[in-house]
Image: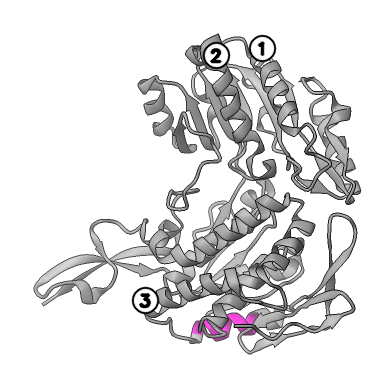
Amino acid sequence: MTTAPPEQDGRLIRLPALTHRGRVETRAVETVHGVDGSALAVLSLCPDLLVAQAVQAQRRAPAPPPRERAARLAEAARRFRTDVLGGLSFAEHCDHVTRVSGHNRSLTEQLSRAVADAIEQAPERADQARPNGSARAWSDIGRRSGSGVWTRRGETLGAVLSGNLPTIQNGWLQALALGYRVAVRPSRREPFTAYRVVEALRAAGFRDTDAVYLPSAHTGATALLRRADLGLVYGGDDVKTRYEGSATIKVGGPGRSKTLVDRAHVLPEAVESVVEAVVESVTALSGVACVNTTAVFVEGDHTRFAADLAAALTARARARQTTPEHLGPRVTDDTARAIVDHLRRRAAHARPEIPLDQVATPHPAGGVVLGPAVFTVDDPRDDVLGAELPFPCVWIAPWSRADGLGPLRESLVVNAISDDRGLITDLLGDPTIQNVHVNVPTVHSDGRLPHEGFVGDFLMRNKAVVSA
């Protein structure tokens, strides 16, 4: 099926809001640019009143039955992969996402196909969080018996998305599978993926009130989170601090994912494969994700490990950074200058293993490709080890058993390259470490593992139901 394409303004795609009453073009608009500076789309921005009206209409609309939701999600996944939606085929969609996100073309397509998988698998993924003692519905409980029943904490969800990766959609899709009506505020840098998802959902039979697409300025994000029953928002320390302690808003990020390499794995016979695993953790997903390793702690000669890692990263990047398959992200010239300047200030006391003048590479198609960068420090508690930059950048520090878990705390993922069962148990027991991998790169995920907990942990609650 082909949906009606948005109106074209020359070569610019028009991205209207997808509201509770269909497509709406607003007076306030914003031009979406590629990293090469070219204008690609005109994005309608929703006033707060339209956001309020959309969420109010969603709250009044009943949730579709579970089987109907699952069937429509499966159909939406197919349409996301195959249909012309919003005037773009899947290949054209990937081209546009590549041009604004800075990911290489292969990664963009891989992640976009992963979004389709997330649409189709949303019911199954959401159900991973359901406790064994709870039924999906009260009608599943036998007479004269009781059970916990998994129920929604609200009716509407506001999702304020970042533009790091297309797969940022995965959380709100699970909410839709659980019966929430979802209002999506897309990234203004990469608005195409969320637009295509909502178009696919509507083409598959979801009502306009089931999922709405509401681009807005920063004030619109606040308005959305205030009006929806629950909210998902993504960002760094500032966003985390703003919403910390809220029972109704879940913050995704920051990551500060780390790799710990014990003494047995820096021996000559083991270190080569370990370095390759760390390279994967640092460079996958363009190095911009919260699961990318940004600090490596080495029990042994950390300077030698850093030199080996720098050599491997340089070899991986060589001859790629000026091609369509560049390793790091491609960003605008201004963004590159700002990031490199910040890096110079932050790393003033650290030792660069790759010369700083090699961190930014001009790309023939426009913009600058960032990374890789490797720095060494000598104190495992150095504040710089908590620095996250949006490209393959990693800090290497020494670690000993006497240092304990302190340097590893406050991590989204820790990959322990170790066979020490006691160490693994200690890592799992630390409440500030959210996920523990054992000899598996920090970037590994199959879509069914908890990320920052299961999304269902936040969206759902258990009620006791007893039937006479």
User: Which residue is found at the position 11% from the left and 69% from the top?
Assistant: 145
The residue where tag 2 is placed is 266
* Left-right relation of 284 to 156: right
Q: Secondary structure at mark 1?
A: helix
The residue where tag 3 is placed is 66
Amino acid under disc 2: Val
Seen in the picture, residue 361 relative to 250 is either above or below; the reply is above
Query: Alpha-carbon distance for marks 3 and 1?
Result: 56 Å
Seen in the picture, residue 309 relative to 22 is either above or below; the reply is above
- Asked whether residue 233 is in view, the answer is no
Q: Residues in magenta?
A: 52-59
Pointer 3 local density, CA inside 10 Å: few below 14, some 14–19, many at least 20? some
Quarter of the figure with residue 202: bottom right
Amino acid under disc 3: Pro
Residue 128 highlighted magenta (yes or no):
no
Quarter of the figure with residue 89: bottom right
The residue where tag 1 is placed is 304
Seen in the picture, residue 440 relative to 8 is either above or below; the reply is above
Q: Are marks 2 and 1 in contact (CB under 8 Å)?
A: yes
Query: Alpha-carbon distance for marks 3 and 2?
Result: 51 Å
* Left-right relation of 7 to 422: right
* Left-right relation of 58 to 377: left
